[in-house]
Image (cartoon, rainbow, N blue to C red):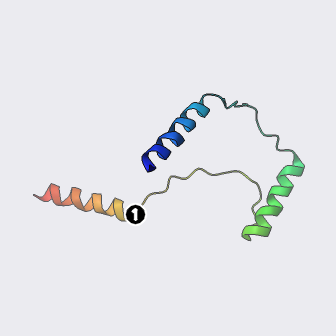
Amino acid sequence: MNNLILLAVLITGLTSCNQNEIKIINKPIDFSENRVRLTLDYIGAHYGIYPKDITINKVLPIFRPLDWFFKLIFINNMMM
């Protein structure tokens, strides 16, 4: 009985996926002076940080223990 219900849900889900097509609108977000000011106010109120601008700095996070583990393996392999 559970397999029949699962099959019915699966078939319903697969058939409904084709009917609704997602439309992506590629248009830039308007950052007027008012929006920038409101964003700075929001950052200050919610995070307690008061930046001079709203520029996002891209940073690649590195999981340090994993980095140390690979360095240890590399060093041990070089000594053998």
Q: Is residue 63 left or right of residue 48?
A: left
Q: Is residue 55 above or below residue 69?
A: above
Looking at the image, which residue sits at the far left? 80
Nearer to the camera, 42 or 78: 42
The residue positioned 16% from the left and 56% from the top of the image is: 77
Crowding at dot 1, Cα within 10 Å, few <14 / some 14-19 / many 20+, comes out as few
Q: Give percent across and percent down for residue 13.
A: 56, 38
Residue where numbered disc 1 is placed? 64
- Nearest to the observer: residue 14 or residue 32: 14
Q: Is residue 32 above or below residue 41?
A: above
Q: Residue at x 83, y 52 (%)?
A: 36
Furthest residue toward front: 1
- What residue is at 85 percent from the left and 50 percent from the top? 35
> In this image, 78 relative to 20: left or right?
left
Tally of numbered tags: 1
Residue nearest the observer in this picture, 39 or 10: 10
Residue 40 image offset from top left, x and y in percent: 80, 59
Residue 12 x %, y %? 57, 37
Q: Quadrant of residue 73?
A: bottom left
Query: Where is the C terminus found, in terms of image quarters?
Result: bottom left
Q: Quadrant of residue 20?
A: top right
- Furthest-right residue in this view: 34
User: Position of 2 compared to 14: left or right?
Assistant: left
Q: Tag 1: residue type? A: Arg
Q: Residue furthest bottom?
A: 48
Check disc 1 and report its element: helix, strand or loop: helix
At 61% across and 33% down in the image, what residue appears? 16
Vertical side of 6 occupied by 25: above or below:
above
